[in-house]
Image: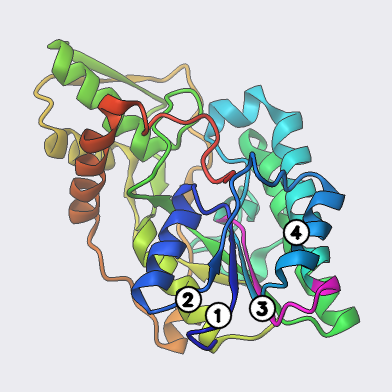
């Protein structure tokens, strides 16, 4: 991928897309094409086809998506499956029609079966039932993977798919109704500290195990894959290590400086018991993450403090840009 190549980053205002833009710019790629969701609705087929015909990007990072946690998936199932299906189908098809040299589709490790063996290997895809609390999103993302594989098989398109683990970092969505667990914890602990509240209540038992990858590491891995990988098989992106939600809560509590107690509301769902990805495929290619979890949480909290007063950190749809 030459430095002067024309690159379209779909979803550049979201957590993932924003990190990819930062990484590309840091690497010297200056011919970047972006559109906000107001400028280009990726759910509209003709609008997407017109955009690709006009701009003719050579490379595409497909990071635009309707994203959210357990509550959002449960509350907006139709939006999660429809929006994501339309976005990926329109972009992938238009990329092929307009001669895009390479496309990277970003999925999520929630695509794997709920009871799949741990750590999650790429070949476990479609070997069992999905986690019910996020199946709408997962089904849509699996469809995106299959689209890339189908266009590769039928048309020879160099479309690849990567599955990042749980992401966090600058630009995250801190809306308590729609955010993922780590940014939600940061906001809850921060607001409790500011208000002088003695207790923060978190969902579930705290026992589920999760893996967390700083979004800047994820972006670095995406650029690495675009430059070094071309295959039908999906590739996991992660750290290869996990911790309990309770242990995560203690780390976030310490970073934020909340001195009260944590109460676990066990009437709320835990979600998948464990979600750790096997990253041996990516490691064998020579890539490793660089940002330790505690340092990453500190960076994310610093970003939150810089932006929350202006209301910029609270968005209902992260990654839709």
Residue 190 appears left or right of 260: right
Residue 125: x percent and y percent?
69, 63
Q: Nearer the viewer, mark 3 or mark 2?
A: 3
- Where does label 2 land, which residue? 223
- Where does label 3 land, which residue? 58
- Where does label 4 land, which residue? 51
Q: Is residue 296 magenta?
A: no
Mark 3 touching mark 2, by CB under 8 A? no
Q: Secondary structure at mark 1?
A: helix
Q: Is residue 100 magenta?
A: yes
Q: CA distance from mark 3 to mark 4?
A: 13 Å
Q: Residue at x 38, y 57 (%)?
A: 215
Q: Residue at x 76, y 65 (%)?
A: 54
Q: Secondary structure at mark 4?
A: helix
Of the residues under marks 4 and 1, which one precedes in the sequence?
Answer: 4
Q: Residue at x 13, y 19 (%)?
A: 260
């Amino acid at each position: 991928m030459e430095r002067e190549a024309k690159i379209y980053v779909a979803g550049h205002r979201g957590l993932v897309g924003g990190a990819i833009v930062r990484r590309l710019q840091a690497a010297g790629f200056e011919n970047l094409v972006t559109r906000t969701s107001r400028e280009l609705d990726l759910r509209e087929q003709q609008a997407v086809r017109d955009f690709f015909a006009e701009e003719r990007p050579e490379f595409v990072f497909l990071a635009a998506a309707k994203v959210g946690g357990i509550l959002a998936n449960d509350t907006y199932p139709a939006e999660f499956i429809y929006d994501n299906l339309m976005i990926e189908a329109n972009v992938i098809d238009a990329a092929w029609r307009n001669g895009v040299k390479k496309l990277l589709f970003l999925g999520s490790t929630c695509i794997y079966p709920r009871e799949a063996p741990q750590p999650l290997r790429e070949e476990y895809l479609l070997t069992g039932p999905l986690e019910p609390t996020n199946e709408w999103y997962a089904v849509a993302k699996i469809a995106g993977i299959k689209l890339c594989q189908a266009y590769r098989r039928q048309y020879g398109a160099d479309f690849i798919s990567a599955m990042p683990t749980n992401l966090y970092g600058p630009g995250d969505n801190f809306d308590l109704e729609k955010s993922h667990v780590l940014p939600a914890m940061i906001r809850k602990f921060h607001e409790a500290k500011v208000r002088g509240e003695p207790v923060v209540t978190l969902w579930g038992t705290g026992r589920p195990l999760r893996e967390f990858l700083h979004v800047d590491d994820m972006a670095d891995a995406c650029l690495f894959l675009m430059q070094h990988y071309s295959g039908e098989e999906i590739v996991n992106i992660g750290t290869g290590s996990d911790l309990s939600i309770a242990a995560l809560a203690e780390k976030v509590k310490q970073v934020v400086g909340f001195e009260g107690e944590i109460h676990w509301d066990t009437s709320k769902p835990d979600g998948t018991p464990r979600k750790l990805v096997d990253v041996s495929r990516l490691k064998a290619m020579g890539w490793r993450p660089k940002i330790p979890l505690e340092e990453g949480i500190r960076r994310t909290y610093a970003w939150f403090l810089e932006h929350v007063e202006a209301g910029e950190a609270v968005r209902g749809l992260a990654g839709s840009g």
